[in-house]
Image: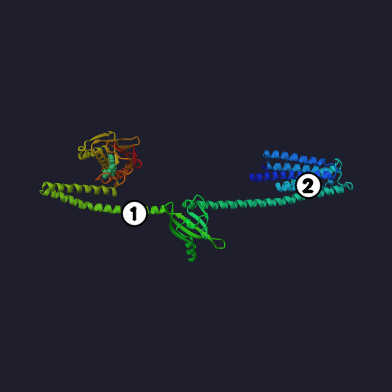
Amino acid sequence: MDTNKNNPKRDLSSDQDLLRKVKWLTIIRIIVASLILGSITVLQFKETRFSFSPFYNLIAIIYSMTLLYSLIIYFDPNPVFFAYIQLTGDIIVETALIFYTGGIRSPFAFTYIFTILCASILLSRKSSLIVATLSSLFYSLTIIFQFTKIWRFPLSYIPTGSQLTFPYVSHTLFANIFAFFLTAFLSGYLAELQRQAGRELKTKDGNIAQLQAFNENILQSLSSGLIVTDLYGNTKLMNWTARKIFNLPGFSQEHWDILFHPLKIEKFFHKMKHNKLNYLRIESHIKKRKKKIYLGITISFLKNTQGIEEGLITNFQDLTELKKMEEQVKQAEMLATIGQMAAVMAHELRNPMASIKGSVQFLDDELQLDQEHKRLMQIILKESNRLNNIITDFLQYAKPKPPSKVECNIADLIQETIALIQNSLADKQHIQIITDISPSLPLIDIDPEQIKQVFWNLAINSCQAMPSGGIFRILAHKTKDKDLLIEFTDTGVGISKEKINRLFHPFYTTKDKGMGLGLSIAYRIIKDHKGKIEVMSTSGEGSNFRVLLPYNSKILQEAVTTQK
Ligand code: ADP
């Protein structure tokens, strides 16, 4: 018996299919039984000589069996096993029918053939042969019992005619059994052919579906937009990227001209036709939600197998980001050129500035000037000093020198910075300077001039942030992470939230005479030393700048700015 276990190839869908067919068999059987019941009832009124009760019994058995099958279906049986049960039941009923209608003389021997046909259709060729064997067995036994008179056959309405002779019985038996097996063989063969064709069709269907899914995947995964239209521009297909570029939620039947407005497909179609081109490349832009989208578009013909043009394929990429980047690169190149020019100019200005300053200084020393002229001379000297400082700062930012590192004691550099600050500003502005330098600071590899520049820039900023005086603190100590931390804290004007993120941008200043390069130079120097600068500040309360320098040559992250 070929059940699920014996035939591993049988899958769930074929099981369901078989169960569906078996259900249909049950329904057809009950319909046939009901029709027979109806005809017997009619016949009973016309033919009163015979007793029809065995037929009624048989039909009652069929109804009961159907009820039983319905219950079995409810428990989700093995479909092959269930089919065999029903077919065997049918053979038994058919044998009973033959028994009641005269055995060898019964005209109902052909009913076995229906069961054999059902086996071929429902199961397999092998099953139809099994059912044919079962039918032959039941039929032969019935006939043998009749011939040997073991059973007494109840109905005699079928004319007996001559006596049952061995040649007649054997001939009838052989003819019927031959018919059963011939039916089983032929119907099994045909059903098998049909099943095979069905399987092949299913495989082909599956292959086609797979191919379609594969094509669909490729189409939808393309990073460029793809639209297929007929020759008049009516859209037939649109992939996901195209929908994304045009901001369409699903496939839209919109005309090509509407999608690519103000371009016209007809114009390109004629151009390609006229110039015998296979494809055309254009760059254009469309407007979507008030935004300009730059597109690189390729239009080509969609030809059928005979090479006749059937439509147009439009392939396009969103070039907006690329255009933006191109613009940025252009601008950056322009700025770089301006920067280079400025650096050259600044460098060239330095020498004449030095000559002017030297000459003015010489004149100031040599000439006997009155008070007013002396004051004017001092202004020239002061302003040329300022110009010189600006040029130095600018060149330092525009053409930074790599740090030339030597082993230094950071505490010395801090002390020097404090001395400079005290000389220049602090005293006049009532600024109290507090230092807290850890005595166990390790020596560190740095460029002392550059780091002193950083300290000076931070310290001068702190002092300038306290125009009416305040406290300026410098702290230096080691951190757990093996960095040297140098903190510059003031009680000055502080920095607002909006300004804090722009502090380290070059040329950002809030001072009348500031250049806005102090912090950007400091940032660059500390970055070159693989350290970092952090700032915390509250507007109106003061600021805290923290410089972290690694003394184990560990690389620190970029500068971080935070607002308290
Ligand atoms: P500059 O000193 O020429 O303005 P900087 O780059 O040194 O250039 O400073 C940029 C700006 O950062 C300053 O104009 C100032 O507004 C702000 N700033 C820097 N340090 C402080 C500080 N300690 N307190 C308040 N504002 C500061």
Residue on which the image places disc 1: 333
Q: Earlier in the sequence, mark 1 or mark 2?
A: 2
In the image: residue 287, left or right of residue 448: right
Q: Is residue 107 visible?
A: yes
Three-letter amino acid code of the residue under disc 1: Glu
Whether residue 409 is visible, yes or no, is no
Residue wearing tag 2: 111
476 or 205: which is nearer to us? 205
Based on the displayed image, in which of its 4 quarters is residue 520 positioned?
A: top left
| Residue type of the residue flagged with mark 2 | Thr
Image quadrant in which you'd find residue 35: top right
Crowding at dot 2, Cα within 10 Å, few <14 / some 14-19 / many 20+, comes out as: some
Asked if the residue at tag 2 contacts the one at tag 1, i.e. Cβ–Cβ closer than 8 Å, the answer is no
Quadrant holding the N terminus: top right
Residue at the spot 86% in from the left edge and 49% down from the top edge: 168
- Give the quadrant of ligand 1: top left
Q: Secondary structure at mark 2?
A: helix
Give x and y (percent) for residue 558. 35, 42
